C-alpha cells in the first residue's frame, strides 16, 4: 500500500519523474519474479504535470498487470514501453507468455478495476492476447491527467462546505 502513497507524492508530479519512478519499481518487481524486462522510454525531459489521482490509477493498473503476468502467463520476458506525445500518454506492457482467451477469463476484482481506473482518469484500457503473449495498452489524454487534481479538489471543497457546521452549532 505504501507504493500507492509514494505514487501520489508531489516529487513525482511531473510525467518524467513519475515514469522514472515506475521504471524503478517495475525493474525491482521483475527481478523479484525472475522475469526478463526490456524498457523503452522517452529520453526528452517530460515536465508536464500529472495529477496525484492519475498517478495513483496508472500505477495500480501497471502493478495489477505485472502481478497477473507473473502469476498466470508463464512468461520469461516482458517489455514496458512509454510513449508520450503532446496529446497523450501510452503505456504498453507485453509478455511472451501463453496468452489467454479473454472470453474464458474469470474476472476477479483486479481485472474489473483496471478499465474503471483508466476511465476515471479519462483514459482507456485494452488487452490484446494471442497464443504467444499478451499486450496491455493503457492510454490517457494529457489534458485529462494534468487536470484530475483540480476536479478532485473542487469535489472536496464542495463536500466540505456542504457539510460545514454553522457558527451557532459551536
Image: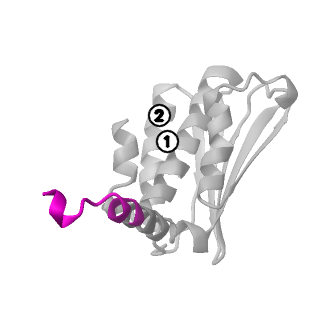
Q: Quadrant of the C terminus?
A: bottom left
Q: Secondary structure at mark 2?
A: helix
Is residue 103 rendered to the left or right of residue 68?
Answer: right
Q: Is residue 131 visible?
A: no
Q: Residue furthest bottom?
A: 86
Q: Estimate how packed mark 1 is, as few (under 14), some (14 to 19) or many (20 or more) residues with alpha carbons within 10 Å.
A: some
Is residue 17 rendered to the left or right of residue 69?
Answer: left
Front-most of residues 67 and 132:
67
Q: Residue at x 53, y 38 (%)?
A: 63
Prevailing secondary structure class for the magenta stretch in the rendered image:
helix
Above-or-below relation of 136 to 45: above
Above-or-below relation of 155 to 114: below
- Count of all numbered marks drawn on residues in the image: 2
Q: Residue at x 47, y 66 (%)?
A: 50
Residue receiving disc 1: 26
Position of residue 132 measured from the top left corner of the image (x, y, whole percent): 82, 31
Residue 87 counted in the magenta span? no
Q: Which residues are magenta?
A: 158-170
Front-most of residues 13 and 36:
13
Front-most of residues 89 and 121:
121
Position of residue 49 measured from the top left corner of the image (x, y, whole percent): 45, 72
Q: Residue furthest front?
A: 168
Above-or-below relation of 95 to 38: above
Contact flag, marks 2 and 1 (Cβ < 8 Å): yes
Q: Which mark is residue 29?
A: 2
Q: Is residue 58 visible?
A: yes
Q: Residue at x 59, y 59 (%)?
A: 121
Is residue 111 rendered to the left or right of residue 53?
Answer: right
Q: Residue furthest left?
A: 170
Amino acid at each position: 500500500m505504501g507504493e500507492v502513497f509514494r505514487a501520489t507524492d508531489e516529487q513525482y508530479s511531473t510525467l518524467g519523474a513519475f515514469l522514472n519512478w515506475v521504471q524503478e519499481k517495475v525493474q525491482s518487481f521483475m527481478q523479484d519474479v525472475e522475469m526478463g524486462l526490456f524498457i523503452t522510454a522517452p529520453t526528452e525531459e517530460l515536465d508536464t504535470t500529472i495529477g496525484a489521482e492519475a498517478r495513483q490509477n496508472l500505477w495500480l493498473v501497471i502493478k495489477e498487470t505485472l502481478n497477473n503476468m507473473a502469476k498466470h502467463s508463464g512468461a520469461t520476458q516482458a517489455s514496458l514501453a512509454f510513449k508520450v506525445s503532446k496529446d497523450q500518454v501510452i503505456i504498453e506492457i507485453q509478455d511472451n507468455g501463453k496468452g489467454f482467451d479473454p472470453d474464458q477469463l474469470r474476472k476477479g476484482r483486479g481485472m474489473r478495476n483496471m478499465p474503471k481506473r483508466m476511465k476515471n482518469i479519462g483514459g482507456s484500457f485494452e488487452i490484446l492476447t494471442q497464443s504467444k503473449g499478451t499486450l496491455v495498452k493503457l492510454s490517457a489524454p494529457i489534458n485529462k491527467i494534468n487536470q484530475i487534481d483540480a476536479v478532485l479538489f473542487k469535489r472536496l471543497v464542495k463536500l466540505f462546505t456542504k457539510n460545514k457546521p454553522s457558527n451557532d452549532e459551536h
